[in-house]
Amino acid sequence: MTPFGTRLRAAMDSRGPLCVGIDPHAALLSSWGLNDDIAGLEKFSRTVVEALADSVAVFKPQAAFFERFGSKGIAVLEQTVADARAAGALVVMDAKRGDIGSTMAAYAQTFLSPSSPLFSDALTVSPYLGYGSLQPAVELARRSGAGLFVLALTSNPEGAEVQRAVREDGRTIGATMLGHLAAENAGAAPMGSFGAVVGATLGDLSSFDLDINGPLLAPGIGAQGATAADLPAVFGAAVRNVVPNVSRGVLKHGPDAAALRAAATRFADEIREAISV
């Protein structure tokens, strides 16, 4: 398969860089007039995909909101992934997996093996058992044409406790993760497949080298307070590779499909304008 970075660059250039989260938590289902059950989960997910999959570049389903319903919820997630990809959208599975050895390899097989019913274009992973613990996922992603988004500088305030900690060599943990990703992406064109999660709410990040030749998944726009106009100041020269994620800012407009499309279009247009400045 064509590498994820190549496919993502093409999707961003043709559809815009917006990533829409699929986060069917109980309060959101209720606001849509749906029950917090399998039927509500299925209706919610199907509506989002049918409304947006032919226009947005990326969907990011949050696995936890499906897993909480057990095997039936996983079945809905499988269908959601399949339907989104069939309509031309890329899928980043937000599962934040992280472990060692054979367990990390099993997580990778779940989401990055083309034979898996949960095969996704990319997976979010946690490197905080050491970046090397991710090697089974890195290797399988390369073989399958998939990608990874590694937690580097996250938008939650607690993240700084670990990510801004300073190593003996003077580098922060977050900067170390960015360095590993730059090495993974060395020589890739037009863009590497190994990205970082970097919060859009973090303000000036000029002390970090975000030019990793790979995508930067940027949560925080909309409900968390960041705006499209903030992106150039946060990401600097790396802004062209930013994949801004909006979840509640779009999803709150459901269940009306036209309203969902209008919200996604508005965010996409604002992001294009901000990035092109």
Image (cartoon, rainbow, N blue to C red):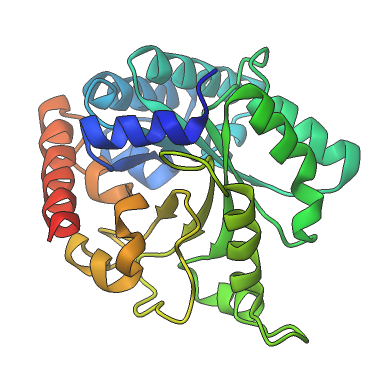
Corner quadrant of residue 112: top right
Quadrant assignment, res 266: top left
Q: Is residue 155 left or right of residue 48?
A: right
Q: Hey, which quadrant is residue 39 in on the image?
A: top left
Q: Is residue 240 above or below residue 43?
A: below
Q: Quadrant of the C terminus?
A: bottom left
Residue 235 at x, y percent in the picture: 34, 67
Note whether residue 36 is visible: no
Count of marks, rendered view: 0
Q: Residue furthest front?
A: 187
x and y, in percent, of residue 232 in the image? 25, 67
The answer to whether residue 84 shows anywhere in this view is yes
188 or 177, which lies in front? 188
Q: Residue at x 67, y 54 (%)?
A: 126
151 relative position to 219: left or right: right
**In the rendering, at what x and y percent does residue 274 appear?**
15, 59
Q: Quadrant of the N terminus?
A: top right
What residue sits 33% from the left and 47% below the top? 247
Residue 169, percent from left and from top: 74, 85
Does 226 sit left or right of 155 as displayed?
left
The residue at 36%/61% (across/down) is 238
Q: Please state which of residues 237 and 98 is positioned toward the viewer in this rendering.
A: 237
Left/right of residue 88 with respect to residue 177 in the rendered view: left
